[in-house]
Image: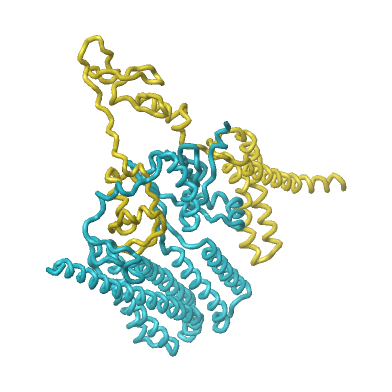
Chain colours: A yellow, B cyan
Amino acid sequence: MNSAPAMANAPARLLACPQCQGPLTPDMLAADAVQRCPTCATELRIAAFPAALRPCVKGGFGDLIVEDTESACFHHAGKRAKSACDGCGRFLCDLCDIRMQGRHYCSSCLEHAARFGSIPELESAYSRFDLLSLAVACLPLMLALPVFLALSFIALEVAVGAGLGMLLFPALFSAPIAMYLSIAYRKRSTGPWPRSKATSIVAFIIAACVLAILVAVISFPIYLTLTR
Amino acid sequence: MNPASAYKRIPGRSRPNFGLLYLFELLFTFSLVALGERCRLFAGTDHLLVLRRRLFTETAHRFYYADIQAITVRRTSSASLASLLLLLLSATSLAFMLIAPRFAPFSDVGVYLLAGLSAGFVLGLALNILLGPTCITELYTAVHHERLECLSRWRTAQRALAQLQPRILAEQGPFDPSGLEPFAPEGPVLAANHAPSGGPQQAAAPGNSYTGGLHFALFLLFLGIVVSSLIDLLGDWTLKNAFDSIYYSVMLIVACVAVAKQRHSALPNDVRALTVFSLVASVVLFEGVQALVMSRSFIPMMNTSTPPDIFKMLDVAQPLRLTTIYINIVLFSITGLLGLVGLVRFRRTLAAVRRMTLDQEWDGNDPAH
């Protein structure tokens, strides 16, 4: 994301080619089709919207208190209160009032909400435990595959042995962790957008398969010893 | 209403949505997530959600439809360059696979490895062609602009725009471009369809009047390398090798200066991209292969004592030398010729537009008018 102070002059910016900053005509924007910049001949399409022509709305600075009976802003004792914060109830002047989704907030309530996610619109970061569990489940495979490929040029038996060793030893730890992550965090919110549970399920299956191989490899010699 | 159902997926993601690669990503999540951010778009009821993922954390940015001022999509030549590079790499690895066993003992594993490498490059080339041309998509609001990396293919960006535009217009109402008239630039701006075919169509480039003289020299130098490489096929002369080293150094310096000069100039995109590509490719491919030749030649020398042994070891470098020559011929002939053609078209158009502007000025001063 780039902050751009020059963005205030939106119409002038729209009339400049985004590639070479050469001038464009309003007709080119009206056409809303693929055009060529007259300066650099870059193929471009500019979809302009009425917001570009809308003048910037300046925020208020807050009116001064004229009479003693008027309520003052919590942060500015000399300024008239215009609203109350919907979070903490403090009186706010025009300068301190932050409007969001039809509600009024003070800056500290907004900061608190952004940190603790109490306002859903402000929540912006989510942890992906399903991907973490998949990565943990695949960790032994990632270690085993390069070893197997590298040694397969020398001898296949050595490669299989070393690959299996590299697969099973880390799996002793990673498979249970991956299974725990995929079960424990299956209901954890990962945002309001649509998300499938496939990654968690795949992670669980991979971890279960690796664990099954591990159990088979450990139990098979014990079984053989017992049957003899 | 379920909040998830309020979002609709918008086409485009910042990684190739291809079966094999997706499978690879599932298996090697750790290695691939480290490569960079992923980006996806969702259209909500009143906002566009740009979702970025780095490692195991997703960050969402909401852009309310009422605040979006413009979405720009501009075509780039990255896909063409990637295709050119992949074509070059696949041809080189194929040629090396065929040439190398004639000069040096080469194991089957090596041949299979090179064949696999060539197949990989060909697959990448096919995928790149399939995905189509590339572009840069940017979204503007009053306070910042956001580059949407997930809309980096032209066709996908057009499809996404077709889905987003009605939603934004429904929120903001129809756009009246007549409001832009007071901000229109002064002086003649020639529309693309009124100007001569191809290349830039305006008389004066904004800010920089460079017309590509250095680029012309650079592309001629590239063709000189092709001639030099053809001579190399006939034999190996020490004096010529020394001359080549000086020639390459001069070429690299000229390429660096050309890359610096082309910034903010009106040079066509393909010429700019070719210059950058040739600079990177000549440094990476040529110098890389030279380093390989040197290492292949000198490491065994440390363990040998007699001159005949050293000469015997130097024979191993022969296929690598041939590969270098082959790369030079293919790379520099393509870039040199394409660059020269682009520059000639650019200059011809520039001259035509200058004539038109002079005519307009003359008409304006004519007392009969």
Residue B185 percent across, percent down from the top left: 24, 55
Viewed as shown, does residue B142 lie left or right of B48? left
Which quadrant would the C terminus of chain B be assigned to in this image? bottom left
Number of numbered discs on residues: 0
Above or below, A125 against B283 in this view is: above
Residue A60 percent across, percent down from the top left: 26, 28
**Depth check, front residue: B34 or B207:** B207
Is residue A1 in view from this perspective?
Answer: no
Is residue A27 in view from this perspective?
Answer: yes
Residue A58 percent across, percent down from the top left: 27, 33
Picture residue at 43% right of the left edge, 27% below the top: A113
Above or below, A82 against A129 in this view is: above
Query: Seen from this angle, which residue lies furthest bottom?
Result: B234
Q: Quadrant of residue B363?
A: bottom left
Residue B276 percent across, percent down from the top left: 36, 67
Viewed as shown, does residue A35 lie left or right of B323? left
Which quadrant would the N terminus of chain B be assigned to in this image? top right
Query: Seen from this angle, which residue lies furthest front?
Result: B368
Query: Seen from this angle, which residue lies furthest top?
Result: A69
**Depth check, front residue: B230 or A60:** A60
Query: Seen from this angle, which residue lies furthest left?
Result: B367
**Depth check, front residue: A211 or B334:** B334
Picture residue at 39% right of the left edge, 58% below the top: A44
**Depth check, front residue: A59 or A96:** A59
Above or below, A130 against A117 in this view is: below
